[in-house]
Image (tube, rainbow, N blue to C red):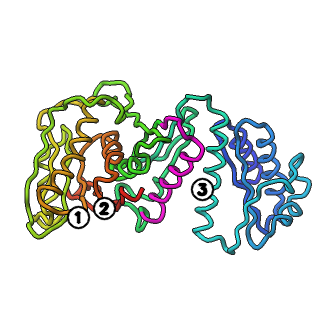
Amino acid sequence: MTSGRTEEELQLVLRDENTASAVLFITPEVQDSRFVRHVEAPLIFQRHLQKDGFVAVVIAAGGLDFQDVANILGETTGAIDLDHWNIKKCTESPVTEKESAQIAEFVLEQRLAMLTKQLPSGEPLKLEVSTRGPLGKNMQKALVADFCHQFRGRFVLDRAWEEHILPGLRAIKCALRRHSAKRRIECSGTLCLPAAVALGIELMPTTTLTAVWTQEQQKVGRPAELWSLSIPREDSGFKKELHPAKIDSTDVALLVAVPPYNARKVTVDIRKSFGHRIPFRGIVQIHHEEHGPITAGEAVDIAHLAKEGIQQAFSAWDVRGSVHLFMAVPAGLAFMIGQLLNGCCGILQTYEYLAETSEYAPAALLFPSST
């Protein structure tokens, strides 16, 4: 790609109203980069001066101090006075993964602080999360979180849950609490069920944070609908059944299946996943064999049945081990189940279904009671 073409494309990106932020990473090498000093930096500062909600973050790295950044950029900053700019400094060279995460969290904080100023009082903040496909630009979404690069199809990269996805969701939750208190958070996205549960656990109802899920229903011929635990519980007709298994185990399996998924098929696949045996004290099944597409109120009912099933199993079998969650449900229901689990179980092992082998593979390990 030619330098002229690079400059043209950079201009298009930075002038696009969908571009919300930019990180200007300054190292000693920038002193010799005409492109950064005379093209990239001026464009970023020009966009900042438009005061349209764009957030510019300047990073001093490679051993640079704050004043070094101003000296390197010189007059290219235009009307910007870097002596009064909140420059972030990286102390390690090269920059560590921990520092990179801190930069990302700082950008998130700045973005949400700006959104708080822009959004009218009472207007919801729309959050979109994806693990299944790249997120396109969407002016209707205030904040997007794309974790697709942590997956290869349905297979998550090694340590991605522990080191990237879950810390990312936690950072989003913390920033929302600081900057969007009392504002409804409308979540949506194309994401795996373990991620939906994890997001629900992070965004469980509190006195300062209310999160709901926008459930897409095009496949069943219905318009999108907000699913929320605040919706009145509607009798779904789903059954809650407890099936005892391995007497010396302290762990409980929770199986939730919504048609067209069949609970019997899910049970068979669970057995196959564990060498055709059930290593749990028992299985709690929440299912209905012939139900059509569920409504928002029915989803609330099923989510509560799941929580009540766990509590009943712990009491009936006198155990208090981990809960292993197997689901074949809409993402909105997985999200609400996650929201209900605080105080219900200490350790939650989620699973990803692998259609290629008809087996369940361990996914995110969650700790609802510590959230």
Residue depicted at x 51% and y 48%: 145
Residue depicted at x 16% and y 58%: 270
Residue lying farthest to the right in this orientation: 75
| Left or right placement of residue 101 versus residue 280 in this view | right
Q: Quadrant of the N terminus?
A: bottom right
Q: Amino acid at mark 2?
A: Ile
Report the Cα–Cα distance between label 3 and label 2.
Answer: 26 Å
Mark in the foreground, 3 or 1: 1
Look at the numbered disc 1 and give the secondary structure of its residue.
Answer: loop
Q: With respect to residue 26, does 329 lie above or below?
A: above
- Are dots 2 and 1 in contact, CB under 8 Å? yes
Report if residue 180 lies within the magenta region.
Answer: yes
Q: Amino acid at mark 1?
A: Gly
Instruction: Identify residue for label 2.
Output: 347
Report if residue 312 lies within the magenta region.
Answer: no
Instruction: Identify residue for label 3.
Output: 105
Label 1: few (<14), some or many (≥20) within 10 Å?
some
| Left or right placement of residue 128 versus residue 19 in this view | left
Q: Which mark is residue 321?
A: 1
Secondary structure predominantly adopted by residues drawn in magenta: helix
Residue 274 percent coordinates (x, y)? 16, 65
- Mark before the other along the chain sequence, 3 or 2: 3
Q: Which mark is residue 307?
A: none
Which portion, as a residue range, is magenta?
162-185
Residue depicted at x 77% and y 55%: 86
- Are dots 3 and 2 in contact, CB under 8 Å? no
Residue 89 sits in quarter: bottom right
Look at the numbered disc 2 and give the secondary structure of its residue.
Answer: loop
Mark in the foreground, 3 or 2: 2
Report the Cα–Cα distance between label 2 and label 1.
Answer: 8 Å
Q: With respect to residue 268, does 96 lie above or below?
A: below
